[in-house]
């Protein structure tokens, strides 16, 4: 199971087919509101017998850590950092499993396995369509607000 924290929680549950060497996406869910410890994620862990879960550690680090403690040994906190290699597995100071992930390499690998047909997603429905948009939107653009920049420098851009 993978959980992304972005304006709510995006939850994706996958199941491997060991005989065919494929991985199928069996459930995609968006949870727009959540509580302070992500208690509703317990339902997914139990209902789908999730044995391994990676959850974004940020921005709600406390809630993600509490969830990882409830399912010790089955949940890893994901931190996206610049590093060599796709993923480095380790533990934090509290012995919570963590995954340090190179975002660019991980998304490139995700795209490649889908192109090669090694990962399958169900028919396009609203939740799955949102998931596909999110996973294929890999370019981040930062736009600077010139009025905000001018305000921080004490400039008045209204007189021109």
Image (cartoon, grey):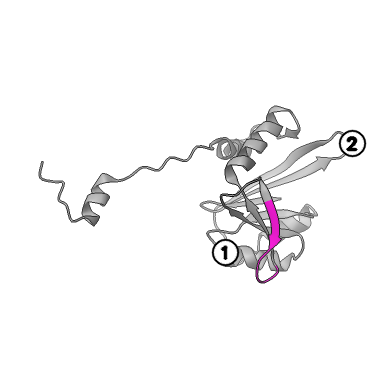
Question: Callout 1: helix, strand or loop?
Answer: helix
Q: Outermost residue, left direction?
A: 159
Residue 64 appears left or right of 118: left
On residue 19, which mark appears?
Answer: 2
C-alpha span from label 1 to label 2: 37 Å
Query: As displayed, is residue 158 above or below residue 63?
Result: above
On residue 83, which mark appears?
Answer: none
10 Å crowding of disc 1: few (<14), some (14-19), many (20+): some
Residue 77 visible in the picture: yes
Residue 140 appears left or right of 81: left
Q: Nearer the viewer, residue 63 or 150?
A: 150
Where in the figure is residue 21, as x and y percent of width and height? 83, 35
Q: Residue at x 71, y 33 (%)?
A: 113
Query: As displayed, is residue 67 above or below residue 19?
Result: below
Looking at the image, tell me whether mark 1 or mark 2 is earlier in sequence order.
2
Q: Nearer the viewer, residue 96 or 52?
A: 96
Q: Nearer the viewer, residue 103 or 84?
A: 84
Residue 123 visible in the picture: no
Asked whether disc 1 touches disc 2, contact meaning CB atoms under 8 Å apart, the reply is: no
Q: Residue at x 73, y 33 (%)?
A: 120
On residue 61, which mark appears?
Answer: 1
Q: Let me know if residue 90 is in the magenta part.
A: yes
Where in the figure is residue 119, as x and y percent of width and height? 74, 35
Where in the figure is residue 57, as x and y percent of width and height? 59, 59
Query: As displayed, is residue 79 above or below residue 111?
Result: below
10 Å crowding of disc 2: few (<14), some (14-19), many (20+): few
Identify the image quadrant of the C terminus. Answer: top left
Q: Residue at x 47, y 40 (%)?
A: 140
Question: What is the span of residues highlighted in magenta in the rendered image?
Answer: 88-95
């Amino acid at each position: 199971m993978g959980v992304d924290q972005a304006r709510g929680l995006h939850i994706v549950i996958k199941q491997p087919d060991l005989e065919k060497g494929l991985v199928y996406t069996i459930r995609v869910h968006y949870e727009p509101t959540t509580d302070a410890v992500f208690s509703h994620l317990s339902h997914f862990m139990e209902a789908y017998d999730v044995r391994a879960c990676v959850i974004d550690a940020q921005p709600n680090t406390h809630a993600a850590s509490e969830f990882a403690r409830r399912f010790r040994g089955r949940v890893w906190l994901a931190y996206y950092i610049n590093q060599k290699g796709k993923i480095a597995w380790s533990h934090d100071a509290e012995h919570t499993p963590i995954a340090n992930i190179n975002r660019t390499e991980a998304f490139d690998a995700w795209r490649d396995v889908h192109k090669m047909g090694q990962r399958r997603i169900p028919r396009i429905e609203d939740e799955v369509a949102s998931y596909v948009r999110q996973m294929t939107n890999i370019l981040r653009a930062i736009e600077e607000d010139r009025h905000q920049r001018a305000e921080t420098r004490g400039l008045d851009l209204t007189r021109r």
